[in-house]
Image (cartoon, rainbow, N blue to C red):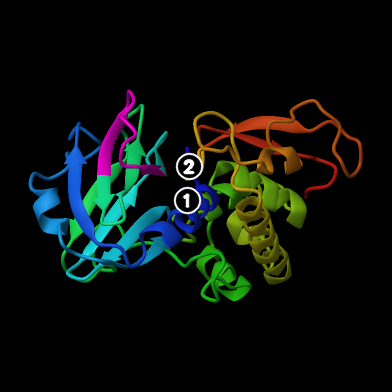
């Protein structure tokens, strides 16, 4: 599913096309997303200008004059900027039309994404209120992870994938960051030292920044706002490479299930 780098890539792709533009209409062809799209969304948005396009965790936030349109891409969703004359294809469920003739079109084959209109304060929304710090911002520190992990027996990989701990570190990026930090994914979070959490914070930021620069990681459905796939998969060190030689030491990359997710690691490089 689209993770933080894919969502940030989408944000950067659509931002210059919609910021400052006025919404003229919203066409909803299928209301049946993860949460049904509310009736009257077009009336709420029509006539408002987009002030900014932001991101919180994996939610896109279109800041308008009277509120915020919050969009989640779900498991297979994508947003693209298209000309108004382009007819919708199968699974293209929502169009936001702007005064420059452009369309922000939402496609979602699995219909697991969501659109929410937030007229009030965004941070207090139930889907956002309990989220941890952003991994690319100053709020994520080694000290924060160290304090939060004390006494925790949960695996460190599961710990950093918990959005209440830190947002946006999905399965692929958790495996990659732990490899770069030299930490075994199954190690108890409470047994990771402050020094090693400092290495992990740096690794998380490095991996996510690399992935954003490469346009995300394409494994199945994701394409960016331009319709092009992401290319970070070409930089993966361990994820999806079970049985292949570690790029550092040559030992075979191993895989195990952890919290029902495939986890990849090098038992020689990671302790």
**Residue 207 in magenta?**
no
At label 1, counting other C-alpha atoms closer than 10 Å, the crowd grade (few under 14, some 14-19, many 20 or more) is many
Name the spot of residue 237 as percent of width and height, x first: 76, 42
Identify residue for label 2: 2
Give the structural element (helix, strand or loop) at label 2. Answer: loop
Q: Is residue 129 visible?
A: no
At label 2, counting other C-alpha atoms closer than 10 Å, the crowd grade (few under 14, some 14-19, many 20 or more) is many
Name the spot of residue 228 as percent of width and height, x first: 56, 38
Kindly indicate whether the residue at mark 2 contacts the one at mark 1 (C-beta within 8 angstroms).
Answer: yes
Q: Is residue 237 above or below residue 99?
A: above
Residue lying at the far right of the rendered structure? 249
Q: Is residue 93 visible?
A: yes
- Name the residue: 74% across, 49% down: 179
Name the spot of residue 161 as percent of width and height, x first: 51, 50
Which of 165 and 208 lies nearest the eye of the viewer? 208
Q: Quadrant of residue 105?
A: top left
Give the structural element (helix, strand or loop) at label 1. Answer: helix
Name the spot of residue 233 as percent of width and height, x first: 68, 38
Q: Is residue 139 above or below residue 237?
A: below
Magenta segment: 81-95
- Name the residue: 67% across, 43% down: 232
User: Which numbered disc flags the more N-terminal residue, 1 or 2?
Assistant: 2
- Name the residue: 24% across, 62% down: 22
Residue lying at the far top of the rendered structure? 90
Identify residue for label 1: 10
Find the distance from the CA under tag 1 to the CA under tag 2.
10 Å
């Amino acid at each position: 599913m689209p993770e933080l780098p894919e969502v940030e890539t989408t944000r950067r792709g659509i931002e210059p096309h919609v910021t400052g533009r006025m919404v003229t209409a919203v066409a909803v062809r299928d209301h049946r997303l993860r949460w049904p799209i509310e009736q009257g969304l077009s009336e709420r948005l029509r006539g408002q200008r987009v002030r900014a396009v932001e991101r919180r965790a994996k939610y896109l936030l279109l800041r308008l004059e009277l509120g915020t349109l919050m969009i989640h891409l779900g498991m297979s969703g994508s947003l693209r900027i298209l000309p108004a004359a382009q007819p919708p294809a199968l699974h293209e469920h929502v169009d936001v039309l702007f005064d420059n003739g452009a369309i922000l079109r939402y496609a979602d084959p699995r219909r697991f994404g969501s659109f929410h209109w937030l007229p009030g304060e965004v941070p207090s929304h139930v889907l956002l209120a309990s989220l941890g710090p952003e991994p690319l911002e100053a709020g994520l520190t080694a000290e924060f992870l160290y304090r939060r992990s004390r006494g925790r027996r949960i695996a460190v990989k599961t710990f950093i994938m918990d959005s209440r701990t830190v947002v946006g570190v999905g399965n692929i990026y958790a495996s990659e960051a732990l490899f770069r930090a030299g930490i075994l994914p199954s190690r108890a979070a409470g047994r990771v030292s402050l020094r090693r959490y400092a290495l992990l914070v740096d690794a998380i930021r490095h991996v996510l920044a690399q992935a954003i620069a490469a346009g995300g990681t394409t494994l199945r459905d994701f394409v960016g706002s331009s319709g092009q796939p992401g290319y970070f998969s070409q930089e993966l060190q361990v994820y999806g490479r079970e049985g292949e030689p570690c790029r550092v030491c040559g030992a075979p990359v191993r895989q195990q299930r952890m919290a029902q997710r495939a986890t990849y690691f090098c038992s020689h490089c990671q302790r």
